[in-house]
Amino acid sequence: MIETLRVARRTPGVLLLLTGNFAVAFGSNIVIPYLAVYLTREQHLSPFVVALAITVKFWSQQGLSMLGGWIADRVGPVGAMSGGLVVRALSYLLLLAVSGPVPVVAACALLGFGGAIYVPAGKSALVRLLGTGEQLRTVFALRSTANNAGCALGPLAGSLLLFLGDPRIGFVVTSATYLVLALVLLRLRKLTDVQDPAAPDPSAATASDAAGPSLDRAKLAWVLACAFAFGFCYIQLEYALPVFTGSVQSSSLVGVLFTVNAIAVVLLQVPLNQSTGKISSSALVISGSLLLMTASFAAASLASVGGLIVCVLLFSAAEVLIDPRIDSEIATTVPAHRRGMAFGFVGTAIAGGGACANGLAAALASDGAPGRSFWLVLVAVSAGFAALLYAVSLALKPARKPEPEPELVETSTGA
């Protein structure tokens, strides 16, 4: 942790980016946990419309992340980050100003689109500042720690604002935070919006350039498959696990499990990634982490309090290992002028995996909640993902060229 902080401190702009990530997560979580309550009580919208608005926000952020990444590649990562923050700030103000189902759903779609621009641009900016060295993975882990800290503290601030006064205060505070941060981040443009000397000029790129050795398409496809598998497994924390826990235990245990996850992620993020940093094979780390998720799903199938807590702890350890590995693989696989869009593809792949998993959970649900057998299905699927991804990674490794045999030199002796 200390060495990672030193790297962040001595690299110009990195601490500002990390602080910005914390501020964005903090500001968002002042509002988002209470958004459904606000729309129901203050806007008097039906539960169906509220669910639709929140779903549209999620799919706008994940599904449009490819477009957001493309924007980051064209205008520069910092310019895109600032633009995304402005879009999000305006969307929060729109949620205060408009009423009715259609305007509210449109404002939520705009909110998601702002996130779709900001997230891939933020990752691309971090790579521009740090390069693709070994320290990048641990700084990505530190970035996730900052995000999770904001996610943990934001709801507390939001509840305090609700207690002190009008619920609209949170929207204004978050919007103001984003607008100020958008201006502050522009200071980094000289550091990040510079063409990577190792990458070709995007305006001069041709079809043959795209197929050249600077972009390993097979490796990129493998990374996106990892993101799909991660999304498939990760979404269980947000849908199947809470619903299942409420059906087999007390609903109050759901809050305990989320608290355990938040604390574990913050505490484990950097130490675990530093300890696995010596393992050069991302395939080994990602497949091993998916096996940790396999074990966590097996623990959940026990349906006991202890089993559910063990499930969340194992799940948290796997989560903090997979996410930075995927980001660092994108950084080393994709040239600089295409990284924004590649990070966007990762977000879309994660969303696709989550959608498939939720569809499976809904299909296997009984009495409104997935049963114990559902977790056994997840055990088989996640173990299959781990084995398949590792096997494909071995197939993608370039074959070692045989060493040339030493030439036999004839020697002659005089008579």
Image (tube, helix red, strand yellow):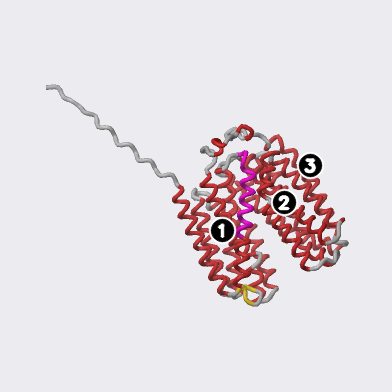
The residue drawn where x is 44% and y is 51% is 394
Amino acid type, mark 1: Ala
Give 1 or 218, whichever is nearer the viewer. Answer: 218
Report which residue position mark 2 lands on: 115
**Residue 385 shows in this picture:** yes
The residue drawn where x is 83% and y is 60% is 161
Q: Is residue 361 left or right of residue 42?
A: left
Report which residue position mark 1 lands on: 229
Q: Is residue 306 left or right of residue 157?
A: left
| Element class at badge 2 | helix
The residue drawn where x is 67% and y is 50% is 65
Which numbered disc covers residue 183?
Answer: 3
345 is within the stretch colored magenta: yes
Amino acid type, mark 2: Gly
Spot occupied by residue 415 in the image (x, y as percentages of width and height): 11, 22
Name the magenta segment's main secondary structure: helix
Magenta residues?
336-353
